[in-house]
Image: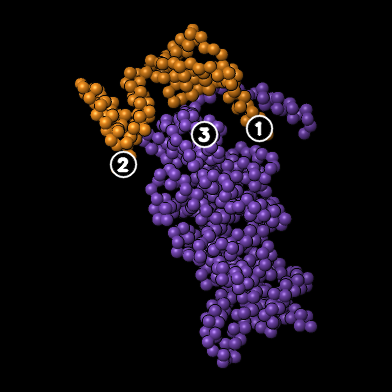
Chain colours: A orange, B purple
Amino acid sequence: MKRVSPGQLARQLFKALESSQEQDLVIQVFAEQLVRHRLRRHLPQILRALETLLDEKEGLVKAKFTSPVEVTNHLKKQVEQAVSQAVGKRVELETHQDQDLLGGAVLKIGDTVYDASIRTQLAKLKLSVENYG
Amino acid sequence: MDKEKILDSLKQHISSFAATVDKAEVGTVIEVGDGVAKLSGLTQAVADEMIEFANGAYGVVLNLESEQVGAMVLGDFSTIREGETVKRTNRILSVPVSDALIGRVVNPLGMPLDGKAAISSKEFYPVERIAPGVIQRQKVDQPVQTGIKAIDAMIPIGRGQRELIIGDRQTGKTAIAIDAIINQKGKDLICIYVAIGQKESKTARIVAKLQETGAMDYTIVVNAPASSPASLQYIAPYAGVAIAEFFMDQGKDVLVVYDDLSKHAWAYRQISLILRRPPGREAYPGDIFYAHSRLLERANRRAKEFGGGSITALPIIETQAGDVSAYIPTNVISITDGQIYLESDLFYQGIRPALNVGLSVSRVGSAAQLKPMKKVAGKLRLDLAQYRELAAFAQFGSDLDEATKKQLERGKRTIEILKQDQYQPASVAHQVLAIYAVSNGFMDDVEVDSVRRFENEMTEYVDQSARELVEKVESGDWSDETADKVKKLIEDFKQVWSK
C-alpha cells in the first residue's frame, strides 16, 4: 500500500466533517481506521494539519512576535493591528521574550520570518567585514 | 598598505553598512537522521536550493514531495532537533570560486582545509549546471601530456577528453593521475584533484608530494574524506567541475581528477536509500547513471567563439577482483571516451604502470597526438600485440626460428621501455627517443636488464649533446631530416655506451 501522509488524512477528515451531519460518528470511524492501519503515531501531525486547514477556512493567520523586552498588551495590540492590516486577514498573535536578540524584533507570519533583530544585524555585519577586501 | 589606511577603509565599510530587515521563508524539521532531514513548510523551496538549519549547518533540497521536503545536511546533523526552524536561502547550491583557490586544499563548499587563510571570493558558481551542447564544442585537438610513456604513446589523452582510469585496489590508479598532474608544470593547465571518500592520510601524502614537486602552484585539491558526511562526498565532484568551469570561462585549460567515482556512487546510494528512493540494481538508485553522465559531460573542449578553454576529466573507478562488468564500471566505461585499464597481475610481475595495453583505449586522443609521437607509436602498438601472441605460443615449443626469437627479444625490450617509476614523468622528446630506439632495433643487443639504464643514460646524453634537436622534437617536428638526426644521435650514443 502506498504510504498515506498525515496531511492527506487530515484533508480527508476535514472534508468528511464539513459535509457530514454526524460529526461524532465521522471522528469515531476515523479513529478506528487509524488504529486499524497503525497510523496512530501520526496523530500529532494530523492535528497540526487540521489546525492549519481550520485557520485557512476561517481566514486566520498565526503570527509570532519575539522581542528582547517584555511585550506589553498595548504593544501587542499595535503589532496585531499592523500585521492584520498588512495581510488583510484576522491575526492570532503569540508573543515571546528572548533576550538573545539584544534589540529589535522578529516577526513570524505564517511561514515567513521578518528578522529585524540586532543579533542578526551584527551577524550580517560580521560576515560583511570577514568578506571585505 | 599601512595600518591607518586599513582602519580607515574598514571604518568606512562599517559605517556604510545598512541595517535591513531580513525576510526569509521558514519550515520545520519533522525528522532528522543519517545526514538526511525531512522538513515541513518550505512550500516555495526549489530543487538544489540551500537551506540553513538552526545550528548553522547548511542543507540541500533533494526531494520535493506534496507535503514535505527531503534535504541532505552538509555538515553536522547531530545537533539538529525535531521541531527546529529551517530557513530558505534563495540560493542554489554553489561554490565560491576565485583565482585564490589555486594551491589550496578546500572542502566541497570551498572552505579551506589546509589551515591557511580564508579564501575571499566574490563569485559563486552553481554546483549543478547543464553541460555545454554540440554547438559550443570543438573537437579535441590538443594533447594532455601525462609524462607516462605507455599512455602518451598508445592511449593518448586530449584536452577536453574524458579518460577513465580503472583497476583493482593497489594497482596504481591514483599514481597515474598524480603523475599526470606533476607533469603539467609549465604546460598551462590548471589541475583539480577531487578526493572522494579517501583516507585523510592518503590525501595528505598526495598534497605533500604535489607541494614537493611544485605542482601545487597550479593545483587545487577538493577533499571530501571518508570521515565527512555522505552529502559532502556526493557533491564533491560537482563542486570540483564547477571550479573547473570558472577557469574554463577565462579561456584556460583544466584537468580534473575524480578519485574515485565508485565511492561517489556509494555516497549517493546511501543518501538515496535514506531518502527512501527506490533501490535498483546493486541497490543503487535509478539515476546513478545520470549522476555520473551529467558530471562527465561537463568535460569539454569549448569552441573559440564561445570563449575557448577546456575541461579534461580523469575519473577513477575501483573494480572488485578485476570485474569490469559490474554496474558502476560498465556505466562509467560507456560514458567516457576510453579507459586506462590497470591489472594487479601485471603490477606484481613488475610491469609498472600496470597497464593492460590490449584492453586500454583512447577513442579521441589520437587526433591530439604530436606528430613525432604518432609516427613512432604506431609501430609500438603492433610490436606489442605481436609479441604477446608469440609469447603465448612460444611457451609450448623450444625450437623457434631466428625471426621469431628476434621478435620475442624485441618485445621484451619494448615492455621494459614502457616501465616507468612513479613521480618520474618523461618529456615528449625523451619518450619519442626511447620508443624510436627500441622499435628500430637499437636496443636489440642491449641486455634486457640494462634496457632502463641504457634509456636513462641515452636521455642524459641527448640532453647534453643535442639540446636543439630535443626541442625540435618537443615542438612536434618530425621531418625526414629530424628523423635522420635522431637516428644518427642514437647511433652516436651507442658508440659511447658500448665502450
Q: Badge 1 is on which residue?
A: A130
The span from disc 2 to disc 1 (Cα, nearest Å) is 50 Å
Q: Badge 3 is on which residue?
A: B80
Residue in the foreground of this view, choosing between B406 and A80? A80
For label 2, the crowd category at 10 Å Cα-Cα, with few meaning under 14, some 14 to 19 and many 20 or more, is: few
Position in image of residue B35 (x %, y %): 50, 41
Label 1 marks a residue whose chain is A
Q: Amino acid at mark 3?
A: Ile
Q: Amino acid at mark 1?
A: Glu
Instruction: Say whether residue A39 is visible.
Output: yes
- Secondary structure found at label 1: helix
Q: Quadrant of residue B205?
A: bottom right
Residue drawn at x 62%, y 69% as measured from the top left = B352
Residue B462 lies, with reference to residue A3, above or below; the image says: below
Circles 2 and 3, Cβ within 8 Å, touching? The answer is no
Residue drawn at x 50%, y 17% as measured from the top left = A96
Label 3 marks a residue whose chain is B
Residue in the foreground of this view, choosing between A65 and B377? A65
Q: Amino acid at mark 2?
A: Lys
Position in image of residue A68 (x %, y %): 56, 16
Could you tell me how many numbered marks the image carries?
A: 3
- Secondary structure found at label 3: loop
Position in image of residue B287 (x %, y %): 42, 50
**Front label number (2 vs 1):** 2
Q: Badge 2 is on which residue?
A: A2
For label 1, the crowd category at 10 Å Cα-Cα, with few meaning under 14, some 14 to 19 and many 20 or more, is: few
